[in-house]
Image (cartoon, rainbow, N blue to C red):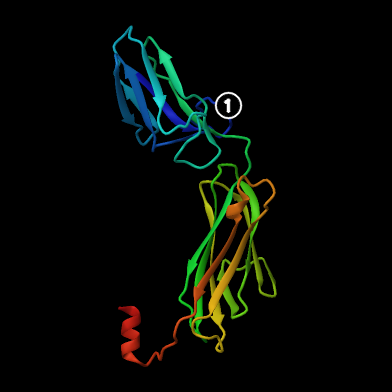
Amino acid sequence: NVAGTVFFDYNGNCTYDSLTDGTQTDNWVFCKVGGQTYSVQVDSFGRYSFEIPSATSYEVSLGGLDANGYMQYYNYGVQACVQKYQRSQPEKDLDFGFKCTPEDHDFVVSSYGGPYRPGRSGFFIANVSNKNCQSANGFLSLTLDNKETYVSANPAPNRINGNVLEWDFVNLGAENNFSTYVEVLINANASIGDQVCHHFVVNPLAGDVDSSNNKLITCDQIRNSYDPNDKTAFLARNG
């Protein structure tokens, strides 16, 4: 019987420590033996196993890796400690560990929301994620359009300077993200067809693997207002 555990190596020693390391459950392991290749998905405990005859040469490898051992479908900076094992006897501790490389963080900002109408409230969500497994601190900066006024946010910004709002976040890693829900009031004199634009920047830019995705500008068109007592308009909006 050939077996092992696929795990995330939090302490970086490339050895599975059940008390400190976390198992990975979305990986496939491949076994080549006798000219055939077999595959199995790890179970809910990160374990895998193959039945191999004694005194048989075989190779066990981990799926989803590029030529340098980085996970192709996972976050940047996640590398396998071992890519494959070649053995001639069954072993039960052929473990595959993932670790963070020394690379820095890679923050990414995204946003969606609307609609926006003159004299009415508008809403949008801003989200910051980290594509690298290296946790880092930072802050999100949002510059509002001059056609709108800030009303509230959850969570509230740590700093407000005119139309610039800033939120701090701590230890943002690949396993979590930071989001804020923002309410604004569109100016009553805004014209139909005007654009409402939001400028986002995630800091720090220094040390970021790809700083091009730290900045985002979203623009939405101001739509026609409607009378809330007009049942036709109301049904059309919600139907």
User: In the rendered view of the protein, which quadrant contains the N terminus?
Assistant: top left
209 sits to left or right of 4: right
Residue located 50% across and 33% down the image = 70
Residue 1 visible here: no
Instruction: Please name the residue that numbered disc 1 is placed on.
Output: 13
Residue located 54% across and 71% down the image = 182
Name the image quarter holding residue 184: bottom right
Q: Secondary structure at mark 1?
A: loop
The image shows residue 32, relative to residue 169, as above or below, that is above
Q: Position of residue 44 (x, y in %)?
A: 36, 36
Name the image quarter holding residue 27: top left
Q: Position of residue 36 (x, y in %)?
A: 28, 19
**Count of marks placed on residues:** 1
Structural crowding at the residue carrying mark 1, measured as other residues with C-alpha within 10 Å and reported as few (<14), some (14–19) or many (≥20): few
- Amino acid carrying label 1: it is Asn
Residue located 33% across and 79% down the image = 238
Q: Position of residue 170 (x, y in %)?
A: 63, 52
